[in-house]
Amino acid sequence: MKAKFKYPMARAVLVATLLVGGSAFGAEPQTLFNFQLSPGAVTGALIEGPDGNFYGTTTQGGPRGNGTVFRVTPAGVLTTLVSDQANLAAGLVVGDDGLLYGMTGAGGAFGFGTVFKLTTSGVVTNFAELNGVNGGNPQSGLLLGKDGNFYGTSQEGGTNGAGAVFRVTPAGVVTLLASFDGGSIGGFPVAGLAAGPDGNFYGITTFGGIFGLGAVFKITPGGVLTNIYSFQSADGFVRHARFPRRMFPNRKRTRHSNPFHRLWFTPLRHYETGTADE
């Protein structure tokens, strides 16, 4: 299924920011594609694939109404690649093998979601499942760690039922790293993780913390979870987007890097109101 500038009654608009002189500041956005019910309601950010095209997910629309995975060229030609995955979580990530990785918020043997990999031609393989303890009902995409494994959050699961942080190996082994308590540490994370320059992961919860309005948390690769900031009403609350996926001010940009990683934000205090890249 291909389309280009065909739908005047759009549900959402796909926008590309034209980077002028290596920066997005001062550039005029260009509309590439107007979504209607098919391929669906867009969630998450686009990622650049190994072929130079962009890939994204929708939560609704498609032939079955369950959402889609789509590809869009820099010229604005959109192709629906996958339409049979249930409740797609927001966003994809490119693995070290050049495949695209993502999650669903439902489905699988336990009904709590799956982890899948996808070729740029649309061949999808479900290779891991969430069971309600190691994770459940994820709403955002995965983060590729320096170790080649994938890391994610889910708004259900964990030992307390208040959400989880987990690791997925390329072979499909899912390990629960930490459980949220729904209280002082936070609970029910909807946004994904970001990798910090210290080797730890950072994220946001939509509930809990000292004031009950969510928290910024840090988790080590070994699973030690710490609340580092509790949101108050003046900060804003109910955060659905992650921090920028990488917070390395001197990180070398590669072909698979998000082009917006050029806009670095280093001090953590800049994130306290939930600024995100998606």
Image (tube, helix red, strand yellow):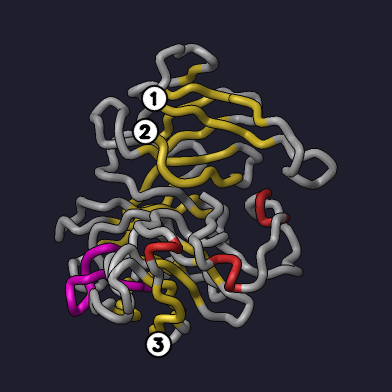
Residue receiving disc 1: 11
Q: Secondary structure at mark 1?
A: loop
Percent x, y of residue 31: 59, 25
Quarter occupied by the N terminus: top left
Which residue appears at 53% of the width and 56% of the height?
276
Which residue appears at 64% of the width and 73% of the height?
267
Which residue appears at 52% of the width and 80% of the height?
200
Res 41 label: 2
Q: Earlier in the sequence, mark 3 or mark 2?
A: 2
Outermost residue toward the right in this view: 21
Q: Magenta residues?
A: 154-167
* Residue 8: quadrant of the picture: top left
Q: Earlier in the sequence, mark 1 or mark 3?
A: 1
Residue receiving disc 3: 224
Q: Disc 1 to disc 2, how far (Cα)? A: 7 Å
> In the image, is residue 158 part of the stretch drawn in magenta?
yes
